[in-house]
Amino acid sequence: MNREDLIQKWLDHNLNPQELEAFKQLDDYDDLTCLDKHLKGFKAETISTDNALDDVWNTINSTQKKKRKLLPVLSKVAAILVICFGVYFYTTTLDTEMNTLVSQQKSVTLPDASEVKLNAMSSITFNESRWDNNRTINLDGEAFFKVAKGQKFDVKTNIGTVTVLGTQFNVKHRENFFEVTCYEGQVKVDTNLKQHTLLPGDSFLIIDGNYIATEKENLSSPSWLNHNSSFKSIPFKEVISEFERQYDVTVSYDQRDANQKFTGSFTHNDIEIALKSITLPLQLKYSKTDHIISLKRE
């Protein structure tokens, strides 16, 4: 039996037990019974069944309209809550990324007031919102860290992780090249090849998957902070790569010289002086056309 017939029989007080149960399941049951109670308080000499039924339908339709009007409002509130939650979740999980371009340096202050200086073509990422619970920095390139006293965090690269506590150190991570130098305090280096704790002046170096012993570092900070790149028995290919990063040029050279060890330095402020600094020790000549430099044996 449809709802209109049930309501009509209810008004006529003509529902059997099964129909009464069906009537109680109607969405408008509470509204109808409430209306019935109010109607019982009124008496009239005559009453039109049709008019009474019209009044019931008007009440039902009015209630349904109110519900229909409320649904869009509730939908909008729900949508706003979802958006607010989404924005909160996005902003708290989004990492902060800092990077540098060719021949550029940049200073970054971490949430704990530690300082990071990025060398050319380098980047770091970390989560500022969750720093207290996730004190991790991802590094690609080269950076010098001056850690606030008592603060601790990890610097992660594809080759190894450096754990620090109130210290000053430099991390250089390029393709197949990983070097950590401690200038103050101590740092712990963890790689697949080896674990080591560095004290001031100690360095940790891996090139092409091989651990390489290094000499004691006498400088109080990395030379690149003063716009000068220095090397001690480093493959010539690494010197050229750093030269290209600092001067935005492409250098072509005999690949037979790629692994020849180079000790020396070059300035970041004068390309002519820099070229002489990297070619004279190896007795190379150079020619320059726009952004392309060619090196050849004399």
Image: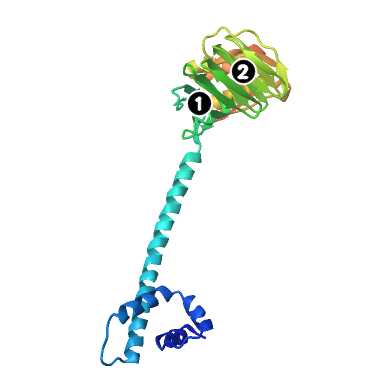
Q: Which mark is residue 188?
A: 2
Query: Foreground: 176 or 248?
Result: 176
Kindly check if marks 1 and 2 are in contact, taking CB atoms under 8 A apart as contact. Answer: no
Give the position of the C terminus as an image quadrant: top right
**Relative image position of residue 183 (x, y in whole percent):** 54, 12
Q: Secondary structure at mark 1?
A: loop
Say how the picture is coloured: rainbow
Quadrant of the image occupied by residue 294: top right
Residue drawn at (45%, 53%) of the image: 82
Q: Which mark is residue 103?
A: 1
Which label sits in the foreground, 1 or 2? 2
Quadrant of the image occupied by residue 179: top right
Name which of mark 1 and mark 2 comes first in the sequence. Answer: 1
Query: Foreground: 120 or 170?
Result: 170
Residue drawn at (52%, 26%) of the image: 120
Q: Amino acid at mark 2?
A: Lys
Q: Which mark is residue 93?
A: none
